[in-house]
Amino acid sequence: MIWSLLLLHLVIVLTIPVVAARLGRNVLWLAAVPMAVTAVWSATRLGAADAVTWGFDWVPGLDVGIEFRVDAMGALLSVLVSGIGALVCVYAVGYFSPTASGLGRFASTLLAFSTAMVGIVWADSVWTLFVFWELTSVTSFLLVGFKHVDAGARVAARRALVITAAGGLALLGGFVLLVDAAGTARISDLPPVSGGTATAAAVLILVAAATKSAQVPFHVWLPGAMAAPTPVSAYLHSATMVKAGVILVAVLAPAFQDTSVWKPLGLAFGLATMIWGAVGALRHVDAKLILAWGTVSQLGLLVSLLALGTAKATFAAVSILVAHAVFKAALFMVVGEVDVRTGTRNINELHGLRRSMPLTFAVAVAAGASMAGVPPLLGFPAKEAAIEAMIQLSGGERLLVGGLVIGGSVLTVAYTTRFLVGMFGDRTGPVGAAASGELVVTPPRPAMAAPEAILGAASLLGFAALGWVTGVVRDAAVTLDPSAEVYSLYRWPGITSAFVTSVLVVTGGLILGALIVRRPVTAGPVARGAAAVDALVDGVARASRLVAARVQHGSLPLYLATTVVALALAASPFVLAIDTDALYWYDNRAQGVLVLMVVAVAVAAARVSSRLGAALVLGGVGFSVAGLFVAQGAPDLVLTQLLVETVIVVGFVVGLGRLSIWFPRAGRLWTGGRLMVSLLMGVTVAVALAAGASNPVGEPPVRELAESAVSEGGGNNVVNVILTDTRALDTLGEVIVLLAVAVGILTLTAKGSRFVLGPRKVPSDELDDGSGADGAATSPVPTDEAVRP
Amino acid sequence: MIARTSPIVQLAIRAATPIALLIAAYALFAGHNQPGGGFAAGLLLGAVIVLRTVAGLQRPAYASTLLAVGGAIVGAVAIGPLLWGEALLDQVVVTWDAPVLGTVKSGSALLFDLGVMAIVVGLVIAVLDGLGATSLVDRGLRADEDDVRPRRSEPRP
């Protein structure tokens, strides 16, 4: 079943671009199909006691496999991922205008992203998880940068990619160390690990999770990712992308519990993020950014709870994960609808929407109350469980972690209040330019309202059917920590200390929120962190452009000289390896004559003053060398050498067709320099050959090769059997090099190519292009102008 | 083009073309037992194309097609055996009795050579194209100020 679902995803991902033009906006319904099917199937697995597995060996030699395992946790997460994904697709039908372009790309990428997320939550091998993890980075980059004509979206997408891809590298390193320490790559079999390797792995994996789940200080990509269309934000920042890091921490927490860094580092990430995110949510005026920062804060809470590692905290984390996915998706959808129907998301400009958009308001209140942890909504029992987990702690941990979590919860209630009042309440913003225009509200769009209403109702229904939710969450939490099975979510906990704390938290938050709403901010804070990341990326790009301009100067003689000098330096130590006793002058006398001929023709080639003449004489050198091969008894080499020389000589005729017939007059320095480089090259090759001949490594395996050529390769020409059979892999590599060279030539010289050859800084007399301006390909255009976007 | 003014060269190249093609085919098939092979056959064909281009008999074309086909063949021969659980690039040797040729023995190495040949020819054409041979063929060589050769190359229609 697992493979058929993934295959269905893949097939639809590939189908969408083909049918997009015909279906228009409705292509999003097609994207919703695999998600809905997956969600339904996962829902049937929720109560199942056994796990469904599927997998195959990918690289048996390295023990790398593709392994999936859908247990209670995996099923719960894929219900969220695919279910919310399907709703987001429906929502996007309403969000985009019927004439919007690129919807095929959008739907295809969204589904591809969803596939990658399903792969993450079902993965049972760290390698599988890694592959899908990277896939989410790439697809989310495409989704965030969906409006690619907008420079801001491009920069935001790049920032998200740079940070999450860096995290991906850390993850790869962490997994390598983890597999080394644990002895298995199967996640469900991971034993608790400890020691130096495991500690390093724990740090790397936590950093990876922090980049993906937007933990301070890696959170800077998330607010920028709001440049994406709102359906993307609703999907990426509720149930999926940002949860990937949380899921990673969750599934690996049992294995890393014994390492000394896991808990403190995880708590540091989580607690700092929780507080800083909530503060950020209080400072912004863009409703979508308020939610984005709120997401950062909630992710911090989740990571803190999972890092704590107590069964109760893990149970609370799973509950909040579910509640958050539901209410945050609904809230993003609300913001998107407000944005589409009023044209703004600025809470200073929005006012009175509770009257003009009643349904949206109801959804926002339900989801917001769930976020604040108010009954009768799913967020309440979940938050309650978290506070209980805090109370169960002891000593300084209880004071610090508990205090911060409760403080974070107060801030959460405060920003929720600010969000709801700012958007739906009466005018609060400064009376001025921003608030002057009357708010025009366009008619409702059913495709947007329906998924919103479903998610808003889900928060309520989750509370109503809390018994069922508890069962599902407990099953999932038990896969992480077996001792979580004793815990439950309570609709009415009674007057416990947790409940009293909850009441205090909500009251405090409401007061704080009301105070902040009354003191409105005009503009959000400057994103310094994001600016720093952008400056870093731009700096690297600038530096590389500088280096490239220096190294890739475009002068062929200098390239050649550099290569030769580098080769000579590399070969110089081997002068000591030459054993003069092992060297002899010749095999037979004919070689002497041929060598003299080679030398004579080579000298002539350097003296000829006509270009074509030089090319022909150079061919003479090649043919003389072919003669040497004849004397050596190597017919294959002779054949190849003759053919290569022929093609090159005639090719020269074509190449020289553009240049004047005569070489330009050269100065002494130029001639001397060329002479030096040539001599250096000759000496280098001679040294390398002599050193090689002085140090034979055993007898050449001529007999074995000859025998295997006939018996295994089925041919009598040993040379060619080596090329096509015995060492065919080498040939394959060489063929790929040839292909790359040819493709390079074709792209570089294609007419109208965007890649323009750099400025030629050859001595000006080299530029005697007799044929005049001939096609843009070879005309010197300043590289800077051509490369700059 | 340089040789366009010389009917002797043109005629000679025309006459040599079929012979060269025959030798290229021979080199391709004989490669397994005699000197030759895909690389040599590709170079032979390449030489034919270069010469014909120089003589203005044809334009260098289809480089990308040849490269793509060659790459596909080589890739298929390389990866194909994996589908049957064999090693990468594992060779299959086929022997059959053909009516005229007698017992013919061949194998996937021949296909591999064919791919190599296509890539080599494609590379030669790409280089020619890169050197701007097409425009030279179209326009003919123009003499420069310091070119002592007499100018008499009016492109023929």
Image (cartoon, rainbow, N blue to C red):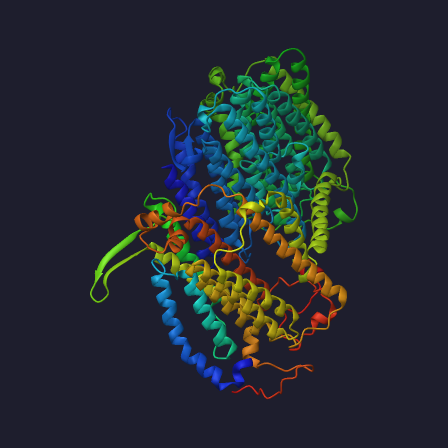
Q: Residue A285: horizontal and vertical position, in percent? A: 71, 40
Q: Residue B10: horizontal and vertical position, in percent? A: 47, 82
Q: Is residue A70 above or below residue A544?
A: above
Residue A767, quarter of picture: bottom right
Task: Please tell me which residue is depicted at 30% across the width and 48% down the height of the picture.
Answer: A711
Q: Residue A569: horizontal and vertical position, in percent? A: 66, 48
Q: Residue furthest top?
A: A395
Tell me if residue A689 can be seen.
yes
Tell me if residue A420 can be seen.
no
Task: Please tell me which residue is depicted at 69% across the width and 81% down the height of the picture.
Answer: B146
**Picture quarter with the C terminus of chain A:** bottom right
Task: Please tell me which residue is depicted at 41% across the width and 41% down the height of the picture.
Answer: A6
Q: How many marks?
A: 0
Q: Is residue A217 above or below residue A193?
A: below
Q: Residue B128: horizontal and vertical position, in percent? A: 53, 69
**Picture quarter with the N terminus of chain A:** top left
Residue B133 as seen in the image, left or right of residue A18:
right
In this orientation, which residue lies closer to the viewer: A680 or A273? A680
In this orientation, which residue lies closer to the viewer: A10 or A675? A675
